[in-house]
Image (cartoon, grey):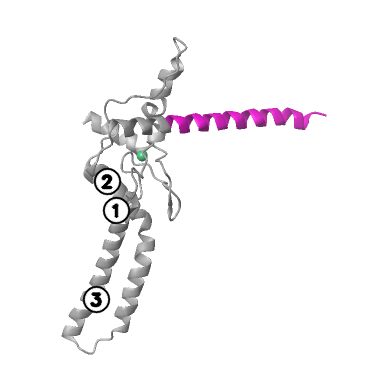
C-alpha cells in the first residue's frame, strides 16, 4: 500500500514531485566526469495506474497516465504532450479516429434514446406530438459531439493507453520531452530574471 500511497501523491500533483522533476536532471547535473547525460533510460514504467483509474482520469479530461489536467488550450485544441509526464497523446496517425468513434457512439445513442422514447410514448398514446422529439433529436445530434469532444479525446487516450501500454522508447521520449520542457522553462525564467535585473538599475539611473 505504500507504493499506492506514493502513486496517489505523484498523480495528485506531478509537477511537485521531486522524483518527477529532479530525478533525471540531477544525474546530468552531477557532472562528475564532465559528461552530459544523453537521455534517460527508464527500465520500468514509472506511471502504472490501474485501468479504472485511467478511465476515470479520461472522463474528467485529465492525462490517463499521470492525472495532470489542463490539457486543452481551447475547447477543440489538445496539447501534443502532457505537461505532467511528457506522454504524447497522438501516438500514431489516426489517433483521433478512436475519439471520433466514442463521440459518434454517444451521440447516436442519445438520438436512439429520443426516438425510442417517442416510440414507447406513441404506442401508449398515438396523439403524442412529434415536434418535441424532432427538436430533441436535432439538439442531441448537434450539441452532443461539440460538448463531448474533449472528453472523447481523453477517454480514448485512456483506452489506448490501457490497451497498449507505453513501450520503452515511448517512455524514454516522454522523459526526454519532459526534461526539455523543464530546461526551457528554467532558461526562460532565468532570462526573464536577468532581463528585469538589467533593466531595473538602468531605468532608475540618473
Ligand atoms: Zn501525464
Q: How much space separates mark 3 and mark 2, taking CA atoms?
A: 32 Å
On whether residue 205 falls in the magenta region, the answer is yes
> Residue 118: which quarter of the image?
bottom left
Q: Which residue is mark 3?
A: 115
Q: Is residue 128 above or below residue 11?
A: below
Query: Dot 1 lies on which element?
Result: helix
On whether residue 200 falls in the magenta region, the answer is yes
Please, which residue is most extreme toward the bottom here? 127
Query: Where does residue 85 sit, x and y in percent of width and height?
Result: 37, 36
Query: Dot 2 lies on which element?
Result: helix
Q: Which residue is mark 2?
A: 160
Q: Earlier in the sequence, mark 3 or mark 2?
A: 3
Query: In the drawing, does residue 138 fall left or right of residue 186?
Result: left
The quarter of the image that holds ligand 1 is top left
Q: Which secondary structure class fits the magenta region best?
A: helix
Which residue occupies 32% across, 83% down?
131
Q: Is mark 1 within 8 Å of ligand 1?
A: no
Region in magenta: 178-206
Q: Which residue is mark 1?
A: 98
Which residue occupies 37% across, 41% down?
68
Q: For the residue carrying disc 2, how many other residues have a C-alpha within 10 Å: few (<14), some (14-19), or many (20+)?
A: some
Amino acid at each position: 500500500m505504500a507504493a499506492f500511497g506514493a502513486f496517489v501523491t505523484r498523480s495528485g500533483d506531478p509537477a511537485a514531485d521531486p522524483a518527477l522533476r529532479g530525478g533525471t536532471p540531477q544525474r546530468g547535473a552531477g557532472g562528475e566526469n564532465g559528461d552530459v547525460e544523453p537521455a534517460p533510460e527508464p527500465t520500468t514504467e514509472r506511471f502504472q495506474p490501474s485501468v479504472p483509474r485511467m478511465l476515470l482520469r479520461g472522463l474528467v479530461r485529465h492525462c490517463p497516465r499521470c492525472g495532470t489536467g489542463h490539457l486543452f488550450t481551447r475547447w477543440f485544441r489538445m496539447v501534443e504532450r502532457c505537461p505532467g509526464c511528457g506522454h504524447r497523446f497522438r501516438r500514431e496517425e489516426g489517433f483521433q479516429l478512436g475519439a471520433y468513434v466514442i463521440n459518434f457512439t454517444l451521440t447516436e445513442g442519445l438520438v436512439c434514446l429520443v426516438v425510442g422514447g417517442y416510440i414507447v410514448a406513441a404506442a401508449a398514446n398515438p396523439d403524442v406530438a412529434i415536434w418535441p422529439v424532432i427538436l430533441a433529436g436535432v439538439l442531441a445530434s448537434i450539441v452532443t459531439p461539440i460538448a463531448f469532444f474533449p472528453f472523447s479525446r481523453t477517454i480514448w487516450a485512456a483506452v489506448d493507453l490501457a490497451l497498449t501500454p507505453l513501450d520503452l522508447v515511448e517512455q524514454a521520449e516522454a522523459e526526454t520531452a519532459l526534461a526539455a520542457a523543464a530546461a526551457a522553462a528554467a532558461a526562460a525564467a532565468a532570462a526573464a530574471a536577468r532581463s528585469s535585473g538589467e533593466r531595473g538599475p538602468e531605468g532608475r539611473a540618473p
